[in-house]
Amino acid sequence: FRVYATAADSYRDHSDFLKTRNHYAFLFAIPPTDYKAWAYGLKKAGYATNPQYPQRIIKLIEEYGLNDYTLVALNQLPATTENNIA
């Protein structure tokens, strides 16, 4: 576990962690919008030890509409108060 000055620093480090390790490289062939494939891919790569990791992550993403953040970041969805991202 690590401590970061800001949430952004944590997100950046996590992304760098995945991008710089060869056993996660195959994930970057998956579209960033395909959160289900990413969840199962992370499990396959050994990222998580919980056998229910993909299902739990997918449930959280869907329950809280977290994929909207990806869509906004990729300019595929406008940030609005309706999707709670404005």
Image (cartoon, grey):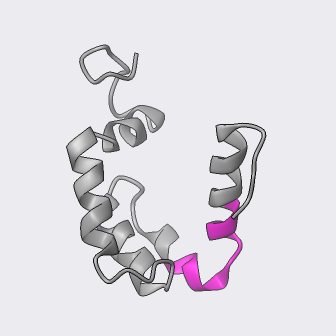
Our reading of the magenta stretch's main secondary structure is helix
> Among all residues in the image, which is located at the extreme right?
5
Q: Quadrant of residue 40?
A: bottom left
Choose between 79 and 13: the one closer to the eye: 13
User: For this view, does 21 lie left or right of residue 39?
Assistant: right
Q: What residue span does the magenta drawing correspond to?
A: 16-26
Q: Residue at x 75, y 46 (%)?
A: 4
Q: Residue at x 63, y 58 (%)?
A: 15
Residue 14 in the image, given as x and y percentages of width and height: 64, 59
Q: Residue at x 69, y 64 (%)?
A: 1
Residue 54 in the image, given as x and y percentages of width and height: 31, 71
Q: Residue at x 62, y 69 (%)?
A: 18
Q: Quadrant of residue 35?
A: bottom left
Residue 82 in the image, given as x and y percentages of width and height: 24, 17
Question: Does residue 30 sit above or below 72 in this rendering?
Answer: below
Q: Quadrant of residue 23?
A: bottom right
User: For this view, does 77 lie left or right of residue 48?
Assistant: left
Question: Does residue 24 sit above or below 6 in this rendering?
Answer: below
Quadrant of the image containing the C terminus: top left
Question: Does residue 49 sit above or below 27 in this rendering?
Answer: below
Q: Is residue 71 magenta?
A: no
Residue 6 in the image, given as x and y percentages of width and height: 72, 37
Choose between 37 and 60: the one closer to the eye: 60
Choose between 28 and 46: the one closer to the eye: 46
User: For this view, does 1 lie left or right of residue 34?
Assistant: right
Choose between 52 and 13: the one closer to the eye: 52
